Image (cartoon, grey):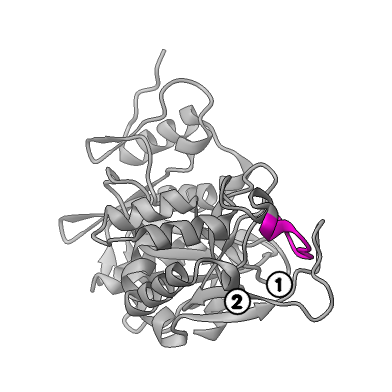
């Protein structure tokens, strides 16, 4: 017999339990449970400054969001982890939130809170690091064609030269050094892809101009836009910075997406950083370096995983929350 929810929080717990939970979503699941079990009402601090907080991440998140919404208190809140959508093993992967059925979502947590009789539904993106020292965090994982489609669907016009250049950078079949005997001859570096400094120069200049001129717009797409039909795009980011001794003693960084985009641009405009390949099957000869494109706190690179050899990956710079 199906369980009958006794209230909104219980209904969300039932949904999450039915879809199942995996270790990769443990952080947002724990935050979600803590919100749904919180003893409301919650008083919002009058002067909440900064973006780094130590303590209970669920309470820090509620206080931060309440402050950004100019609330004095939160009467009630319920949350659900949408990570269950990606890990469900049985049946159709759908969650019901605010009467809307969703099958995919860029937000990892969807929070519904009430204050002064008004209900607010908010999407939250989460990142987590469980190492002693902060590492970089994956922001967006796609392909050359997927990134071009994301930009094209949001008003950008990308030339054929730029598309070719990005496929060279990702090592798409037909665009690799190994596909051209003349290029491959006497090549001493990775034959599976072209590096940023090697890609079609016209296309490369177009990408550099686009990422420099439209840094805020592109950053917003990477933070918020993964699906055309997404009804709950992230408005906030919650980032567990490093390993914690307990949930109640966890350091987190919290931002609105608008704040993060502005701080990221202030931190760095588009640039390329030299680096050598020191690991893997194709280590660089001494003195050889390549250019890594990055803008703000976002780093752009070829994925490189064996199961996804031509993926394009965007990461958040390690320890960015200490540098902004």
Where 9 sits versus 123, above or below? above
Instruction: Report the front residue among 84 and 9.
Output: 84
Query: How crowded is the residue under tag 1: few (<14 C-alpha within 10 Å), some, or many (20+)?
Result: few
Instruction: Report the front residue among 92 and 58.
Output: 92
Circles 1, 2 touching at the beta carbon (< 8 Å): yes
Where 72 sits versus 95, above or below? below
Residue at the disc numbered 2: 319
Magenta residues, start to end: 182-191
N-terminal-most mark, 1 or 2? 1
Q: In what element is the residue under mark 2? A: loop
- Which secondary structure class fits the magenta region best? loop
Task: Please name the residue shown 49% across and 59% down the image.
Answer: 166
Residue at the disc numbered 1: 133
Residue 275 figure quarter: bottom right
In x, y percent, where is residue 173? 58, 45
Give yes or no for residue 190 being in the magenta stretch: yes
């Amino acid at each position: 017999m199906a369980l009958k929810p006794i209230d909104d929080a219980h209904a969300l717990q039932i949904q999450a339990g039915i879809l199942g939970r995996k270790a990769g979503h443990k952080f947002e699941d724990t935050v979600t449970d803590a919100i749904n079990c919180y003893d409301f009402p919650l008083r919002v601090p009058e002067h909440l400054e900064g973006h780094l907080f130590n303590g209970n991440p669920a309470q820090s998140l509620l206080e931060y969001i309440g402050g950004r919404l100019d609330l004095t208190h939160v009467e009630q809140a319920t949350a659900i982890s949408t990570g269950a959508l990606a890990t469900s093993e049985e049946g159709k992967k759908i969650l019901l939130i605010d009467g809307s059925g969703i099958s995919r979502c860029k937000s990892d947590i969807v929070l519904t809170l009430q204050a002064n009789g008004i209900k607010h539904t908010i999407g939250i993106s989460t990142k987590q690091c469980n190492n002693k020292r902060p590492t970089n965090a994956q922001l967006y994982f796609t392909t050359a064609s997927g990134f071009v489609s994301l930009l094209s669907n949001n008003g950008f016009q990308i030339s054929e030269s730029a598309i070719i250049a990005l496929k060279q950078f990702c090592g798409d079949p037909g665009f690799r050094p190994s596909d051209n005997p003349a290029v491959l001859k006497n090549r001493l570096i990775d034959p599976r892809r072209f590096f940023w400094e090697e890609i079609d120069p016209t296309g490369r200049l177009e990408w550099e101009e686009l990422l420099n001129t439209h840094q805020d717009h592109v950053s917003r797409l990477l933070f918020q836009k993964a699906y055309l039909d997404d009804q709950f795009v992230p408005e906030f980011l919650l980032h567990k910075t490093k390993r914690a001794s307990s949930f109640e003693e966890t350091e987190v960084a919290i931002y609105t997406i608008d704040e993060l985009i502005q701080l990221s641009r202030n931190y760095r405009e588009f640039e390329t950083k030299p680096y050598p390949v020191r690991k893997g099957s194709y280590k660089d000869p001494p003195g050889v370096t390549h250019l890594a494109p990055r803008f703000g706190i976002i780093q752009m690179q070829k994925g490189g995983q064996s199961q996804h050899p031509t993926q394009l990956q965007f990461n958040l710079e390690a320890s960015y929350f200490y540098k902004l």
